[in-house]
Image: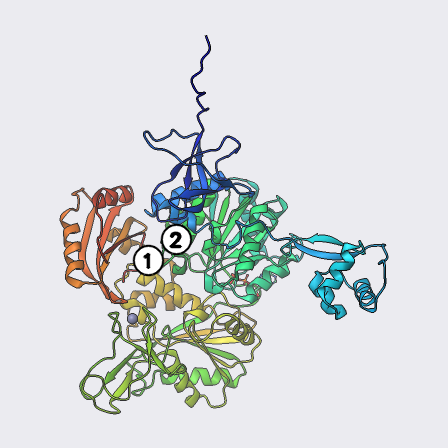
Amino acid sequence: MFDDSPKKPLPKSVVSVVLPLALEAAYSYTVPLAMALEAGDYVNVPLGPRLVTGVVWEIGVAAPAGMRLRDVREKFDLSPMSAIQRKFIDWIADYYMAPLGMVLRGCLRAKGIFEPPRMKVAYRLTDIEPQRMTPQRQRVIEAARDLPVMKARELADEAGVGVSVVKGLAGQGVFEAVDLPPFAPFAKPDPMALLVQLSKSQGVAAAALRGSVTARKFSVTLLDGVTGSGKTEVYFEAMATALVAGKQVLLLLPEIALTTTFINRVEERFGAAPAEWHSQMRPRERERVWRAIASGEAKIVVGARSALFLPWHNLGLVVVDEEHEPAYKQGDGTSYHGRDMAVVYGSLGNFPVILASATPSLESLVNVDVGKYAHVTLKNRHGRAELPQIELLDMRQIPPQSGQWLSDPLVDAVAETLAAGNQALLFLNRRGYAPLTLCRTCGHRLQCDECSSWLVEHRFKKHLMCHHCGHTESVPQKCPACGDEHSLVPCGPGIERLAEEAEARFEGAKIVVLSSDISRGESLHEKIRDIAQSKYDLIIGTQLVAKGHHFPDLTLVGVVDADLALETSDPRAGERTWQLLAQVAGRAGRGEKPGRALIQTYMPDHPLLEALEAGDREGFLTHEKEIRQSAGMPPFGQLAGIVVSGNDQMQTESFAMSLARRVPRVADILVLGPAPAPLAQIRGRFRFRFLVKTTREQDIQGFIREWLKDVQPKGSLRLSVDIDPYSFL
Ligand code: ADP
Ligand code: ZN
């Protein structure tokens, strides 16, 4: 008997594909018979009416019942995303409770990677003579003899003829077309390019770090060395070892520390410019770096935290410099912590991670205490440099005159320093001219219309600015409340105002003001270089200057207001103040000359400041750990911040209240709030906060998932979850 029923097609295999969209899960697609796919392949798939590029997550998955699946449309000719990277993305999405697709999106931030790289066609002279010589053709041929291979356009311009002349000659075989690589290649670093004679203690530290690399397995080492002890030189040794083993190396820095000076230092040490990765890059350069990382050509990447999401080919070491920096915690989007994710990546990829700092985070120190991290220390500055002497100035005893911010002893110390031909730094962690402007007549304070924050006067830019939403407006002539003229007065100092005072007091001194809004990009790099070359006498800056820089002639640091950061509700306020003050004081005396730091405070009895003056780091840390432990705060407990926001205050509040009513009751899990957030309004949106606090052992994500299950914020309402928050505003 013949079976004349139509042949059943072979069942197609099914794959799940993650798309870079705000979707929680992967979507299923069938694979056309002619297409071979593996997990990690980049593909185009139909989604509604459009084509979307995504990544194959799993192959051979069971087809969801009763659904007609669509075919994968196209596979890209790129090496597949590694299993480690996919696990990493899964891990982040799960831990930070972020849509998988949004985490993937962070991995594809390079335009052009899904188009075939455009080869550049260049022309090379052959032995063939043109059929008929003309003066124009003659010129092109002569130009080509003296020049490297060039594009037709460039060659034509060089010879002063039209492109058609070059193309015509190519048609006759006088020129042959050659493909040039679309991107300049990355030079191969040489692990031995510059050999530094390490001191004995540096040598011991370097050996420990090299050991972690040669062990070829996951480990975390905290490189804990005072400012100027040579941590950079020491971790360079570990990087060299990883390069010798053929591995790629990632050196993570807080975005702001990615300066030309630092990149040059890496280039000098390894004889080749490293690849860079940060938010200010041009699209072409992003594409170049992305491709070179995927192919394994780029060996060293110096980058900001998002470099973790590059398509690493064989990453073998991550160094996180300034590991204590809160800037490693991403503010918006998926709110991940760059240092913590470097450690997660190391454990997934089974390679070592080095965390370096002069003021390590309490998190890392506690991990050392419990034996999770190895501890390598450098106790002294390199060479003859000494750690600066730290002295507190009790502002209750020596208050400056009204409208001034520098006490007499600090003024004298700066004057002496400048007279001796050295540099001084005045540190104030406040941008702008004055943090508050108020009306002398009616007491009205100038506030942002959209946010609950004061407007900060910026005199250089001649406007008022909201530091939360970036809104700017010109300084009004009259008080907007009472209409009085000339009644608005600035209150309190910002660095611009401090600069005004310094100019009056230190006549003839060359003063430079450094903060993130005055100096961006190149001009900032230039200023930092000029400071290092002693082209300025007095530096006035925000936390921007506290980090990493090496200014050999700087011998005096003055902290204008040490109390600023202590007065917040942030559980890490003490730790941060300690780190900031120790780092900024650590800018002094890094060269041959001894340095000192004078710290102005109205709270000289504060245990933190006393410990700082006494150089008693252990004492401070013990105290700080006790406080955190007894309060169940990180790293001894876990936190999550949940912010509800919306355009309408009543509606937002009642949504927050409805969430409060459904909080599951679980022993040892505390949900605080809802309370109006300290920043109760940002960009016109009203905000209410919850804070979830659990022990370390508890599944905080599981608890929040259970709590917020089926919650659908409607209209303008939004709900955001921040695991391990660093911002409590
Ligand atoms: P850290 O990173 O701990 O602040 P650096 O690595 O920047 O310290 O070192 C401080 C300064 O001392 C730098 O200018 C560095 O080049 C120099 N230095 C450190 N160790 C050595 C060494 N073994 N030989 C020569 N110079 C060194
Ligand atoms: Zn605002």
Count neighbours of disc 2 (C-alpha within 10 A) and say few if under 14, some if 14 to 19, many if 20 or more. many
Residue at the far top: name it. Answer: 1
Residue at the far bottom: name it. Answer: 485
Taking 21 as reference, is 64 above or below it? above
Secondary structure state at the residue bearing disc 2: loop
**Residue at horizontal 22%, vertical 60%?**
646
Amino acid identity at mark 1 = Tyr
Secondary structure state at the residue bearing disc 1: loop
Residue that badge 2 annotates? 337
Horizontal side of 650 relative to 56 (left or right) equals: left
**Which mark sits nearer the N-terminus, 1 or 2?**
2
Horizontal side of 671 relative to 417 (left or right) equals: left
Ligand 2 quadrant in view: bottom left
**Residue at horizontal 45%, vertical 13%?**
3
Q: Does the residue tagged 2 have its C-beta within 8 Å of any atom of ligand 1?
A: no
Horizontal side of 372 relative to 529 (left or right) equals: left
| Residue 288 visible in this rendered orientation of the protein | yes
**Residue 207: image location, x then y, percent:** 57, 48
Count neighbours of disc 1 (C-alpha within 10 A) and say few if under 14, some if 14 to 19, many if 20 or more. many
Q: Estimate the spatial distance between the alpha carbons at disc 1 and disc 2, rounded to whole Å.
A: 9 Å
| Residue 235 visible in this rendered orientation of the protein | no
Residue 211 occupies quadrant: top right
Amino acid identity at mark 2 = His
Q: Which mark is residue 726?
A: 1
**Residue 687: image location, x then y, percent:** 22, 61
Horizontal side of 255 relative to 633 (left or right) equals: right
Assess whether mark 2 and mark 1 are in contact (beta carbons under 8 angstroms).
yes
**Residue 440: image location, x then y, percent:** 22, 87
